[in-house]
Amino acid sequence: RSLLTAAHCVDPERVGATSVTIRASNKADANTLNTGEYINVVDRRLHPNWQWSGSDMAAPTDVAMLLLASAPSGVTPAAINRAALSGFTGKSIRLVGYGRTSAAASSSSAIRRQITLNGTGQDANYIDFGVAGSQGTCVGDSGGPAFHTFSDNVTRQVGVLSGGNSQCGEASDVRVDIHAGFIDQWLSDKEPPICGADGRCQTGCMPVDMDCNCAADGQCTVACPDVLSDPDCPR
């Protein structure tokens, strides 16, 4: 039920309001949405260090978590990247969003599109990508995910689109790994781990939760039956 997005997308202060109503959908073409296809957002949390600056340019704490009223049917939750990124420049990332197709467009397209590019830079807070005025993201794509398929063949979300330039194309994603603590605290508060495969260790399970045996604990043993899910096992 948890949805990761950009704080500036769900901060009422951005539009001079005191409250905000948020609804979500998973439809590829939002132009054809009807009210029965929305899922209400019943709770939200902006990063504690987030503050609206009056600009949609990238900000290092531009992340927020939303709680859907119900889990969408037929949707497998995406894994997030918790491992520190390094040397990400030149690596392939897949961007997804509903935004404008050019800077000249009058509004967002409301159609989900994706593009695969190579990262153009990385620092302590951001992943950079795109070609100005040509390939990348645009207005209306904010809060959308960037995915990377790692050496273990698992695709994880590595970024949240925060901001870019006025030409569209070049932009920056806030790194997910540096906010894993914020995300995991939300999940602990709103969606506690279960005695089953959800990527989080739940103690006291009978039998033992396999996520505990497959955690990053410096050991690769037969206690974890799925070696690809154990970061300590060689690939």
Image (cartoon, rainbow, N blue to C red):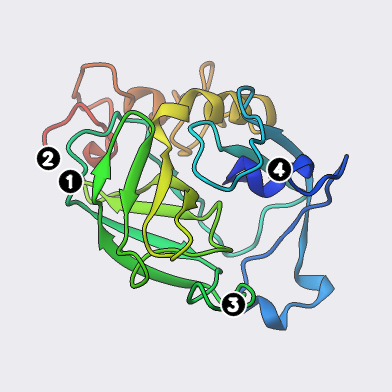
Q: Name the residue under label 2.
A: 235
Give SS at disc 1.
loop
Residue lying farthest left?
234
Give the label on residue 151, or none. 1
- Please report the residue visible at 78 percent of the width from the left and 49 percent of the height from the top: 15
Are the two marked residues, 1 and 3, in contact with CB atoms closer than 8 angstroms?
A: no
Circle nearer the N terminus (4, 2): 4
Left or right side of 217 for 109: right
Q: Name the residue under label 3.
A: 109
Camera-side mark, 4 or 2: 4
Asked whether residue 192 is in view, the answer is no
Are the two marked residues, 1 and 2, in contact with CB atoms closer than 8 angstroms?
A: yes
Residue 55, position as x, y percentages in the image: 61, 44
Amino acid at circle 3: Ser
Circle nearer the N terminus (1, 2): 1
- Please report the residue visible at 49 percent of the width from the left and 65 percent of the height from the top: 138
Q: Mark 4 points at which residue?
A: 67
Amino acid at circle 1: Ser
- Please report the residue visible at 62 percent of the width from the left and 29 percent of the height from the top: 50
Circle nearer the N terminus (1, 3): 3
